[in-house]
Amino acid sequence: MKKSSLNKKALATAGLFLVAALSLSCPSYAQIVQCTHGQSGHIQDTSITTVPSYWGWGLDFILNSGNSDWVHFAVPTVLFEKTRYLAIKFATGSVDAIVNQVDIWSGNTLVKQFLNLNWTTSGPSDAQWKILDLGSDVNFESIGISVGIGAGVEAMSHRFLFHSVCAEFHP
């Protein structure tokens, strides 16, 4: 009986050391997703929009017909971590209200531009996530996301609703 007890202890100890050795030899992969709420967005030229509403779910405003503008977001940045993927959740009042460009900034350095996007939704209840792939991992000083928007001239809604902007960080 004593020999069996020793074998179990020796086996348990060996197993513990094996798990510890494997854990230390394999790099860990921790993913952190940081988001900023839509209501933190700043409209660049509020003279061509309705007064923005800051709701519990995000930012809501109407861009005057035939105009274009920018909405800027700052995403909380995890120091010493990299990101490749960013995401925006938004809706538009009609297909005549368009997200046409997204610029990604690290501090005051332009990292990447996404041009000619033509993102739109069928209405406010049709909020969508759009994923932005930077193409490779980038170390950011701080993340700024500038969303270029435009309103057509049709007799349709030019409403914009921004729910959230996010970045995925990893070592």
Image: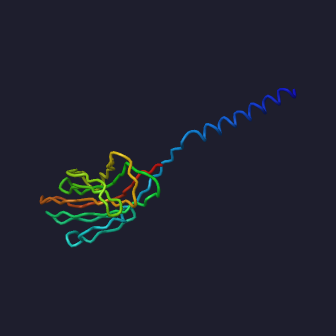
| Residue at the right extreme, as displayed | 2
Left or right of 168 in this view: 161? left
Left or right: 22, with 109 as reference point: right
When the figure is inspected, residue 137 is found, relative to residue 143, above or below; the finding is above
Name the residue rendered at 29%, 58% in the picture: 110
The total number of labels drawn is 0
Q: Quarter of the image holding residue 70?
A: bottom left
Q: Nearer the viewer, residue 122 or 86?
A: 86
Nearest the camera: 43 or 137? Answer: 137
- x and y, in percent, of residue 143 in the image: 37, 59
Residue 139 drawn at (x, y percent): 40, 54
Q: Is residue 13 above or below residue 131?
A: above
Report the side of 102 relative to 77 (left or right): left
The picture places residue 54, in percent across and down from the top left corner, at 35, 68
Q: Position of residue 134 (x, y in %)?
A: 33, 48
Colour scheme in the image?
rainbow
Q: Nearer the viewer, residue 58 or 130?
A: 130
The residue at the point 77 percent across, 32 percent down is 10
Give the residue displayed 22% in from the left and 69% down from the top.
Answer: 49
> Looking at the picture, does residue 85 appear above or below residue 74?
above
Q: Toward which corner of the image does residue 106 lie, by quadrant?
A: bottom left
Q: Quadrant of the N terminus?
A: top right
* Residue occupying the point 79% across, 28% down: 7
